[in-house]
Every structure is written in C-alpha cells, then in structure tokens.
Image (spheres, rainbow, N blue to C red):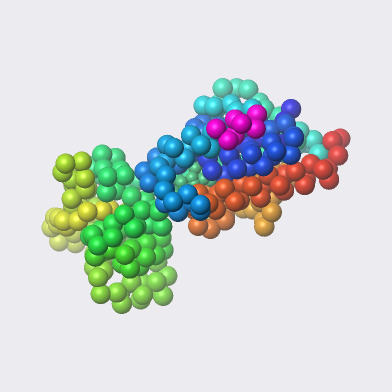
Amino acid sequence: AFDVLLVGGGPAGAAAAVYAARKGIRTGMAVERLGGQTNDTLAIENYISVLETDGPKFAAALEAQVRHYGVDVMSQQRAVELIPATEPGGLIGVRLENGATLKSRSVILSTGARWRNVNVPGEQEYKNKGVAYCPHCDGPLFKGKRVAVIGGGNSGVEAAIDLAGIVQHVSLVEYNEQLKADAVLVAKLKSLPNVTIHTNAQTTEITGADGKVNGIKFKDRVSGDEHLLPLEGVFVQIGLVPNTEWLKGTVELSRCGEIVVDAKGQTNVPGVFAAGDCTTVPYKQIVIAAGEGAKAALSAFDHLIRTPAP
Ligand code: FAD
C-alpha cells in the first residue's frame, strides 16, 4: 500500500507527488496522461520565474521531476471508483478501469478539468491557431487584433471585459436572448466602446485560411440570417467541466461538479484531499494548481503523522 496516492498528474498532481516523495513516504500516481492540460498548451508565459515555455516542454519537465524523486507512476490508468476507508486511519481504495484496486493511507484527487467545446466546424482544426479557451493565458497573444467570445455567462462576459482591454475589438456571441452573467458585469461590458454584443446568435462555424482563424459565422435565431464576422481569434467560454463524474456520491461536489475542499485541501472523506482545476478553488491556472497540489501533499503528510494505522 502507498502512504500517498495521487489520482491525476497535471501540475497539481505533479507538485503533490514531489512534495510527498520528498517527505520519504511511499508515493504513487495513477494518471491517464502525465502533464494534463499543459500538453495541449502552446505558449506558457505566466508561470512565475519562467519567462516563456511551451506546453510539451513544461509537461516533460513535470514528468522528469516526478520521476527524479522515485514516485511510482502508473501511466495510462483511469480511476473509476474511490472506496473510502472502513475505519479511521484505514486504507482507501482507488479502483482502476483495468480492474485493479490500489490502496493507500491517503489519496489526493487531482483529475483536473476540460473546457466544454462548442462543437462547430473549425473548432478542432484551429485549436491553438486562433481558437482559445483561457483569456488569462492567451489574451495577450491577440493584442491589437479582433476576437469573438462565445458565451454570455459570467465567464464569457468576464473574458470579454478582460480582452477588451488588450485587443482591438471584441464581439460577444450568445445563443440565448439575454446574457446570463451578473447584472454588474453586463453593465460594465455594455459601457465598453470596443465591444459588440450579439444575442440570439447561434455559432455555426469558425472559419480560417492558411492554418489560422479568419472569422466566425453565426445565425440570427430570430431572423434566420447568417452573419460572418472577420476576426483573428475566438475564445470559447461555455463552461469548464471538472473530471469528477467518477466521484459522484462518494465525495462532496459543488453544484457544478467541483470537489469541495477546505483551506487545507481536505475533502469531506477522511484521508482524501484534492487540488487543482477539479476543486472549488477559483482561477484555474498552472501556478495555482501547483501551489494547491503542494498544499494538499503537506496536509496529507500532516494527516498521516496524526492518524495511527488501525
Ligand atoms: P490537469 O492539467 O487537467 O491534469 C489532470 C490530470 O488528471 C491529467 O494527468 C489527467 O490525465 C488526469 N486524469 C483525469 N481524470 C483521471 C482519472 N479518472 N484517472 C486518472 N487520471 C485522470 N494555465 C496557465 O497558468 N497558463 C497558461 O498559459 C495556460 N494555458 C492553457 C491553454 C490551454 C489550451 C488549456 C486547456 C489550459 C491552459 N491553462 C493555462 C490552464 C492550466 O493548464 C490548468 O489550470 C492546469 O493544467 C490545471 O492543472 P491540474 O493538475 O489541476 O489539472
């Protein structure tokens, strides 16, 4: 059995693994894809002390550090069930898709999240070539250019306000008749001179040429008219989905499926901690996920030294 078992190995899981292994305790990691979302990232320019790197390089560096400390990495493994301990300090089980069950005295859940796709032609083709999901990450790449934001909920409207300060022009495209964001955000958005809002607008295609986005097509759901907006970037902001479906009914989740954690990263299940994009901690960023992972590992260690095995 392990002392600490990580489920997931993005920035949160990798940081937790390094912190746990450096305590000299038995540390394992079950992970589908080491590096997580960073594998899909082009430029990373906001990880403190690293002026610029790219996703695959960042993911490779995470893996090298995890392996340097002798973490028992089980790659291409998908966890499908968490089995809480039956007595205080007892072993917690993590069942894998392949049928095996791993046992550990503590578990750190760090399964991350995925951006919801709009599923229109052009989205996959131009991902990272004009189609983006994270305004904090990729906004500056569109300085002085024209962009659209798909989605008029809080994240879409926040993204549009944020981007309006960087880019030349923002078109916000919302499917429904009204923006669903908080009134104060909508008022702020409407006050900005370089933002146009399209409601009742169904995105039908992201167009491009020469391997880059050059426009967005949408249908006016009232008149039925098709419109084409020429632009250089599209931010899809229709939701971030935590990878926590497998924990429903075992661990307390928020309304949107995020694992509820306290200030120490502890979940409602004894000995089970969580960190990164899969939790209720706001602002989904690498530096935040890594910090939360380190914190969860220290909390797990603290739990271990205070909880005798039965
Ligand atoms: P993730 O990176 O999502 O890692 C989750 C891990 O869990 C993966 O290893 C996955 O394989 C594994 N996993 C999931 N489910 C299971 C399961 N059931 N069993 C086993 N393993 C599982 N942030 C920045 O700070 N700067 C940027 O420039 C930046 N750019 C981005 C660009 C893109 C295109 C995207 C998508 C995100 C970007 N982000 C950026 C956000 C950043 O990547 C995330 O905040 C960060 O990766 C979250 O780390 P995490 O460890 O919580 O989760």
Residue 297 visible in rendering? yes
What's the residue at 67%, 56% (across, down)?
A: 262
Give the percent coordinates (x, y) of residue 152: 34, 62
Span shown in magenta = 64-71
Q: Is residue 66 inside the magenta stretch? A: yes
Instruction: Name the quarter where the N terminus is drawn.
Output: top right
Residue 216 in the image: state x and y as whole percent: 20, 53
Query: Residue at position x 28%, y 63% from top?
Result: 167
* In the rendered image, the vertical position of residue 252 relative to residue 200, given as above or below: above
- Residue 35 shown in magenta: no
Left or right: where 181 falls relative to 26: left
Residue pictured at 64% horizontal, 39% vertical: 18
Whether residue 243 can be seen here? no
On-image quarter of the C terminus = top right
* Predominant secondary structure, magenta span: helix
Does 161 appear above or below 82?
below
